[in-house]
Amino acid sequence: MRDTSSLTKDGVVESPQQTPAPVSIIGDSGIVYMKGLRLHLIVLALCIALFLTNLEVVIVSTSLVAITDDLGGFDRATWIISAYLLGYVGVVIIFSKLSDIFGRKLMLFTSVMIFVLFSAGCGAAQTLTQLIICRAFQGAGGAGCFGLGSIMAFELVPHAQYAGLTAFMSIVYSLSLVVGPIMGGAINNSTTWRWVFLLNVPASIPAIVIILLCIPKRFPHHGNPELSTVPITRRLASANLARVDIFGVASLLLATLALVAAVEEAGLSFGWNSPFVISFLVISAVLWTVFLFWERRITFNITGASPEPVFPWRFATSRVWVGMLINAVFLGAPWSGIVFQLPQRFQVINEASSIGAGIRLLPFTASAPVGSVVTAALAKKGVSPIYLVMFASILQVIGFALLGTLRVQDGFAISSAQYGYQAMAGFGSGTNISLLTLMTPFSVEEKDKAVAIGAITQFRVMGGAIGLSILNTAMHGYLKSKLAGTLPKTELGALLNSAQALVGLSPSHQVAARTALVHGYNLQMQILAGLAGIQLLGSVLMWQKKQIKV
């Protein structure tokens, strides 16, 4: 068929009415597909944003020991990670919803700038507290970049190209996981850990320039002349601001923060039966209940002046969608857990360097993109994603369970078998990350697509934050119970504060401490196997007579 498409003043391809094949309708906004150099530049900007924000999740995994040796607080090292994830959790749905109201371009630019500014703040931090605070805001910017990047990727191409684009974006996402730990190790071996954060400042400049120059003002509604000419002052008017679900946003953020804080501090500063932990657990439960009731209320009572729900109640009443959210939560915990705990194990137990720890994590991080690409290709060829999700969940359970069986070897050498176990867990994890994202646009109404993609990401990252808290609490509780009668209180306290204290112990105490650490890390992997198993429950809920096809 002869191509009769024309180019609008915004540089987008506009197909005439008589040419049906390349036409795309987004709501009532009309046809909106770009092509050529402009399309490639926008994809490049999204890839840079996705790569850098996900790189920051894992690049610190091989830097935690160096950071806490400098700033102290090894027992609270996971807060460096959890703070980033909490910032992520708190706003990823929010940025998705705000982009519906104020536009994708404005919110993506805002997200990138927040990420860049607080990356610089992390690099300049002088105390662990300063670093944790900056990491939280850095995570908030990263959430916007990842959430909006994922949404906009689906709006750049027709439905028929979703599987291919999802596979490509999964490769970018997984590539950050492959190079992140190694890059973090290389930075720590050659210069200061501060460049782990400072590198984002110059690296983000190309994305910022492309966002400003190439993305249409009202993307993806730039094909609608009425919407594309709306000035920013009108978009920021009080009527639009009133559509923001501020109460829902606040209750969701505080509910998650209270839950993570309770789990993180239990076994460290407070006992599980302490007033602090019990109070925060109760507060979290109340806030989650309030959040759900509030979202139900405004979903059914929405008017022109009412806020638009950040989590529409129809999500909670869809069995398939609830199953997808359960899968996302219990995928996030194993994913984040292994990425952060294994490099620590290699450094603390096996005395590997930072870069050596990153290299030894490659079987997991390299197999994840393989799983993403292979299963996305199978889904595109007609295989129902639900079968692939179930297979991947089982593979994760087996891989994590085997990682929890590693024995103490002579000289605490690294078992070669663990590389195969990593590959199994990585393939399964990468598969489900890709498939849950791919299935989302086909599981919800068109008007909910942006919020739904944000929700899948948010619940996965929330699962990661909660999972890390559980692992940290389990490890420290185990070490205290096993070493309390072996190490003096001062030595045990020093070990929990900094892994560097291990080398200062007597030979017999070093062996006892390393043996306890080995069993502690095994316990963490066993916990991850159990959490991965809950994904099977989510998969059962996702089952339906007519399976989702992509």
Image: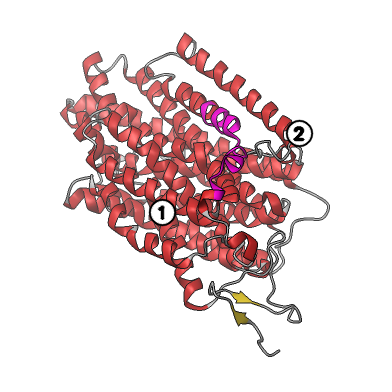
Q: Where are the magenta residues, as a range?
A: 234-254
Vertical order, 467 against 381 (above or below): above
| Residue 90 spot, x, y in % from top left | 50, 36
At a point 48% along the width and 15% down the height, the residue shown is: 277
Q: Is residue 274 visible?
A: no
Q: Which mark is residue 497?
A: none
**Crowdedness of circle 2 by 10 Å Cα count: few (<14), some, many (20+)?**
few
Q: How many labels sit on residues?
A: 2
Q: Earlier in the sequence, mark 1 or mark 2?
A: 1
Q: Amino acid at mark 2?
A: Asn
Q: Which residue is mark 1?
A: 177
**Crowdedness of circle 1 by 10 Å Cα count: few (<14), some, many (20+)?**
many
Q: Is residue 406 visible?
A: yes
| Residue 105 spot, x, y in % from top left | 50, 57
At a point 51% along the width and 60% down the height, the residue shown is: 170
Q: Main secondary structure of the magenta part?
A: helix
Secondary element type, mark 1:
helix
Quarter of the view holding residue 119: top left
Q: Nearer the viewer, residue 238 or 207?
A: 238
> In the rendered view of the protein, which quadrant contains the N terminus?
bottom right
Q: Nearer the viewer, residue 22 or 270?
A: 22
| Residue 462 spot, x, y in % from top left | 52, 37
Residues at marks 1 and 2, CA–CA distance in whole angstroms: 43 Å
Q: Which residue is mark 2?
A: 301
Q: From the viewer's perspective, is 497 left or right of 447?
A: left
